[in-house]
Image (cartoon, rainbow, N blue to C red):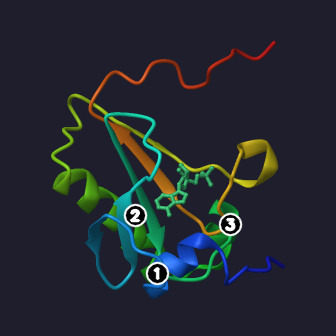
Amino acid sequence: MMTYDSENIFAKILSGTIPCREIYRDDHVLAFYDINPKAAIHALVIPKGAYVNASHFHTSASVEELVGFYRGVEKVVGLLNISPEKGYRILSNCGPHGGQEVPHYHVHIFAGQPLGPMLCQPHA
Ligand code: AMP
């Protein structure tokens, strides 16, 4: 059972209490630029539903929400003129080991430059 904190910062962005640099929204997703970009292009895509993390979303969202979300991610890739041929990275941090800071499920989209290795340090 996942408990959703409705005071988290992305909930406030969704409700319009806090502004964002919006890229796209539809019935299922909101996409906006990360406030602290870690690549030339760094966007965030969040579902409109109250899901804490990837596992919560993947186990509890309806098929419509799941498809709507991931189609939304691809829509944002297109809107940002990111070519799959050049490439990009999508990433979702889950929980403490994943380094998740905001407890509303989100996918990062990084692009616009070679992104280097997947992690800073190899597994020892
Ligand atoms: P994560 O560690 O995956 O939870 O990442 C959370 C991301 O949210 C970080 O990359 C932050 O820079 C970003 N972030 C935090 N607050 C805001 C905000 N108000 N607007 C846009 N991005 C934010």
SS of the residue at dot 1? helix
SS of the residue at dot 3? loop
Looking at marks 1 and 2 on the same chain, the residue that comes earlier in the sequence is marked by 1
Q: Which mark is residue 56?
A: none
Q: Quadrant of residue 41?
A: top left
Say above or below: 58 vs 62.
Answer: above
The residue drawn where x is 76% and y is 54% is 95
Residue behind mark 2 = 70
Q: Nearer the viewer, mark 3 or mark 2?
A: 3
Residue behind mark 3 = 103
Mark 3 CB within 8 Å of ligand 1: yes
Residue behind mark 1 = 14
Badge 1 density bin: few <14, some 14–19, many ≥20, Cα 10 Å: some
SS of the residue at dot 2? helix
Residue 58 relative to residue 90: left or right: right
Looking at marks 3 and 2 on the same chain, the residue that comes earlier in the sequence is marked by 2
Q: CA distance from mark 1 to mark 3?
A: 13 Å
Looking at marks 1 and 3 on the same chain, the residue that comes earlier in the sequence is marked by 1
The residue drawn where x is 48% and y is 74% is 47
> Ligand 1 is in which quadrant of the figure?
bottom right
